[in-house]
Image: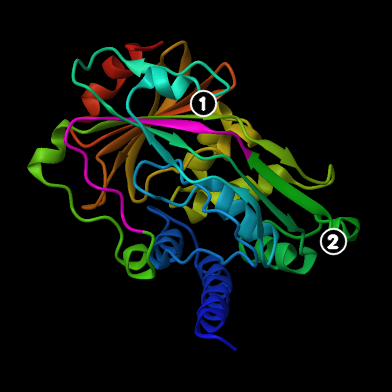
């Protein structure tokens, strides 16, 4: 067995054990069990990885798509994966996208623009694992029919866009040490950083009998939300829209607010690493995440200025 295979097996085992342990911890207040799981930051290895699928999160946080895949299956397969591509302008990005990109008109400075690569992740439902996780989460497993065992699931994310204004921290490198340590603490200079991420709603293939509500609620709690926060989140975002988001860790507070032509969730963080807030909303088949390192009071005025 090669060293890379040994590392992959170790990471897979650690992620599986962490999922069982964290769901055995009662969720209350700031979701202690969820914080434990997220602190590990160990992604499940893909047996075949032709490319590196992009993370839509501005700081490399775990997307809900990744958490859901880990709940449903023991292993996942990256079927296709494009690398992210830095481009000079939003107009040049538009030629690579299947949707009309937006910009933050309240910012006059020139942004850094990145086209996020498309990817498809596939797996097969592991009924035994899913029932165990539902039971440990206190939801019961009677809603998981045996007929969906080994049923195929897939998540296909089209190309997205990240537009970063101001002095933003460099993204964490794709190393195990970086995943364990997380992003560095922001500096005072980072207070000017605002990042707008735009992701088309992903295409999802899943068995009709799958209880997507229960799976999504577990995924949200594993990212650090309380049950009440998870329920409010689900009132704003559909199953598919949710999978394009990567909610912040250590959420201190949240509120439902107008965002553009829709309603969104403004999430203020309590961590010392990463951004200070994220405002997320969905409109016209696109999921938006406005992330900032300054004051959360800036979020709504910035969101109102988002337009082509």
Residue 39, compared with residue 232, is above or below; it is below
Q: Which residue is located at x 84 percent, y 46 percent?
A: 209
Residue 299 in the image, given as x and y percentages of width and height: 28, 24
Give the residue pinned by disc 2.
149
Find the residue positioned furthest to the right: 147
State left or right for residue 140 relative to residue 181: right
Disc 1 or disc 2, which is closer to the eye? 1
Asked which secondary structure carries label 2, the reply is loop
Q: How far apart are labels 1 and 2 at the CA level?
A: 38 Å
Q: Which residue is located at x 62 percent, y 31 percent?
A: 238
Residue 121, compared with residue 285, is above or below; it is below
Residue 179 belongs to the span the image colors magenta: no
Q: Over which residues does the magenta segment extend?
A: 157-173
Residue 43 in the image, given as x and y percentages of width and height: 50, 63
Residue 155 in the image, given as x and y percentages of width and height: 67, 44
Is the residue marked by circle 2 packed among few (<14), some (14-19), or many (20+) residues within 10 Å? some
State left or right for residue 41 relative to residue 142: left
User: What colour-coding does the image apply?
Assistant: rainbow
Is the residue marked by circle 1 packed among few (<14), some (14-19), or many (20+) residues within 10 Å? some
State left or right for residue 51 relative to residue 305: right
Give residue 168's mark.
none
> Of marks 1 and 2, which one's residue comes earlier in the chain?
1
Find the residue positioned furthest to the left: 188
Does residue 265 appear in the picture of this structure? yes
Does residue 138 appear in the picture of this structure? no
Give the residue pinned by disc 1.
96
């Amino acid at each position: 067995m090669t060293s890379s295979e040994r590392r992959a097996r170790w990471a897979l085992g650690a992620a599986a054990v962490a999922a069982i342990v964290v769901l055995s911890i009662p969720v209350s207040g700031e979701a202690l069990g969820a914080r434990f799981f997220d602190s590990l930051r160990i992604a499940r290895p893909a047996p075949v990885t032709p490319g590196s699928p992009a993370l839509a999160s501005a700081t490399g946080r775990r997307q809900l798509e990744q958490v859901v895949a880990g709940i449903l299956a023991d292993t996942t397969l990256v079927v296709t994966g494009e690398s992210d591509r830095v481009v000079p302008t939003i107009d040049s990005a538009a030629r690579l996208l299947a949707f009309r990109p937006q910009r933050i008109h309240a910012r006059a400075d020139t942004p850094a623009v990145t086209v996020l690569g498309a990817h498809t992740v596939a797996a097969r439902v592991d009924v035994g694992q899913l029932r165990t996780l539902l039971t440990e989460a206190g939801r019961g497993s009677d809603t998981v029919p045996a007929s969906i065992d080994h049923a195929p699931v897939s998540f296909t994310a089209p190309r997205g866009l990240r537009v970063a204004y101001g002095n933003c921290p460099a993204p964490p490198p794709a190393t195990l040490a970086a995943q364990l340590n997380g992003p560095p603490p922001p500096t005072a200079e980072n207070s000017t950083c605002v990042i707008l991420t735009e992701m088309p709603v992903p295409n999802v293939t899943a068995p009709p009998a799958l209880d997507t509500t229960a799976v999504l609620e577990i995924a949200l709690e594993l990212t650090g939300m309380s049950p009440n926060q998870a329920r409010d989140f689900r009132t704003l975002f559909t199953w598919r829209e949710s999978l394009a988001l990567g909610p912040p860790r250590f959420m201190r507070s949240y509120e439902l607010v107008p965002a553009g032509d829709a309603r969104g969730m403004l999430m203020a963080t309590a961590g010392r690493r990463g951004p200070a807030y994220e405002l997320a909303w969905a409109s016209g088949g696109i999921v938006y995440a406005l992330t900032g390192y300054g004051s959360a009071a800036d979020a709504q005025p910035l969101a109102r200025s988002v337009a082509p």
